[in-house]
Image (cartoon, coloured by chain):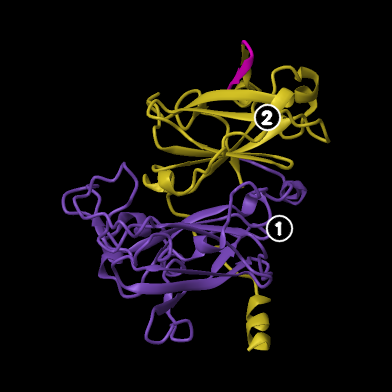
Chain colours: A yellow, B purple
Amino acid sequence: MPRRESSRLSEKRVPTPSQTVGPFFGYALPFEGGHEAASGAAALRIEGQLLDGGGEPVPDGLLELWAGQQFARCRTDSEGLFHVTVAKPASGDEAPHLDVTVFARGLLRHLATRIYFPDEAAANATDRILNLVDPARRHTLIAHAEGAVLRFDIRLQGESETVFFAL
Amino acid sequence: MVRLPAEWFHELPGPVFGRVPVLARDADLTLQHEGQPLGERIVVSGRVVDSDGHPVRHTLVEVWQANAAGRYVDPVDDHPAPLDPNFTGAGRCLTDGEGRYRFVTVKPGAYPWRNDENAWRPAHIHFSVFGASLASRLVTQMYFPGDPLMALDPILQSIPDERGRDLLVATLDLALTEPEWALGYRWDITLRGRNATPREL
C-alpha cells in the first residue's frame, strides 16, 4: 500500500478549489485571545473597518494577520470593525509589515494584502513589494496613526479599493 | 490584483497557528457533550498533500458544520430546524507525519439559505487548512457523493470546471468505515506547493 500511494503522490496535483467561508464560522474559527498576537510594552493596537464596494460595513468578515512568529485572527463586528494587537515586526529585506488574509461570505476565495507602517517612510520607499504597486494606490497599504493606535481600513471594491495580491 | 514575483512564496515564514488550541477531543465532534448527537455517525478522513506531491505534515485542519437537522449553532443561523444539545459542530486536528487527518462527526443536513426562493445548500462540511506558507492557506467545503442538491447549488457551481467541483466531493470508503458504528468518507486535500502555483480548476 505505501508504494502505490507514494507513486501517486509524486505526481503534480491540482489544488483543491476554494469555497466561501460563509456566514456561520463565528462559533468555530475565532479562539480565545485570537486577536492578541502580542501583549505588554511591545503591543501595538491596530483598528480598522472592513467595507464593501458600496462603502457599507461587512459584519461577518474574518481576518488573519501574520508576521514572523505572530498570528492573530479576528472577526469583524456588526459595524465591520476589527482590532488586533501585534508587535511591530523588525525590518528585514523588506519594510516592516503584516500579511493579512481576508475571508468573507461574498468572497469565493480569500484575499491577501499587507499592512505597512506610517513611521517607516524610508523603508517603505525602497520596499520591493510596495514598489510593484501603482504609486497612486500605495497609500491603501499603509496604516495611519490615530493617537496611540494605528488605523487600517480594508475596502473590498470601489474607487479606493485596497490593493490585494494574487497568491 | 498585483501579481507577486514567484520567489516571494519561498520567503514566507510558515503560518504560525500554534496559538490555536487543539485538544484530542476536538477531532471527535460526537464526544463534546454529555450525550450522543442525533444523526448518522460518520468518519471523515483523508490526506493533505501539496501540489508538488508532498504530504503536509502537522498542519492545522479546522472543520465546522450544521447538525443533522441542517442547523448551525451559530447565532446568525435562524433556520427553524432544531438545535441538538449534544452537538456543536466544530472540530480541529493536526495532520500526522503523513499528512493524514481524521474526524468523527454526524452527517450534516441540507438547509435552505434564501439566496432565492426555495434554495437549499447540499450537505457539506466547511474546512480550513493552513499548510506550509501563506500561499497554501485554504478555506473550502466538502460535499457528499450522490447528493442531488449539488447540481443546484450556486456555491459549488461557482467552480466552472467539473473536475474542480469533483475535487470537493468525498468518496464513501469502506476501509474507513467502522463496522457496526460509523460510515467512512475519504476526502483528500491538495494545497498549493512551494515550487509551483498551479491554477485552480
Q: In this view, does B63 lie to the left or right of B24?
A: left
Specify whether residue A12 is in view. yes
Residue A144 location (% of width, % of height): 62, 17
Residue count near mark 2 (Cα–Cα under 10 Å), binned few <14, some 14–19, many ≥20: few
Residue at 42%, 43% (x, y): give it. Answer: A26
| Numbered circle sitting on residue B194 | 1
Q: Which of marks 2 and 1 is in front?
A: 2
Residue at 75%, 31% (x, y): give it. Answer: A89
| Numbered circle sitting on residue A39 | 2
Kindly identify which chain the residue marked by label 1 belongs to. B
- Give yes or no for residue A94 being in the magenta stretch: no
Q: Is residue B104 left or right of residue A139?
A: left
Quadrant position of residue B150: bottom left
- Same chain for mark 2 and mark 1? The answer is no
Give the extent of the magenta segment: A147-152
Q: As displayed, is residue B24 above or below residue B115?
A: below
Give the SS element for disc 2.
Answer: loop
Q: Report the front residue among B33 and B22.
A: B33
Residue A11 location (% of width, % of height): 65, 75
State the residue lying farthest toward the front.
B34
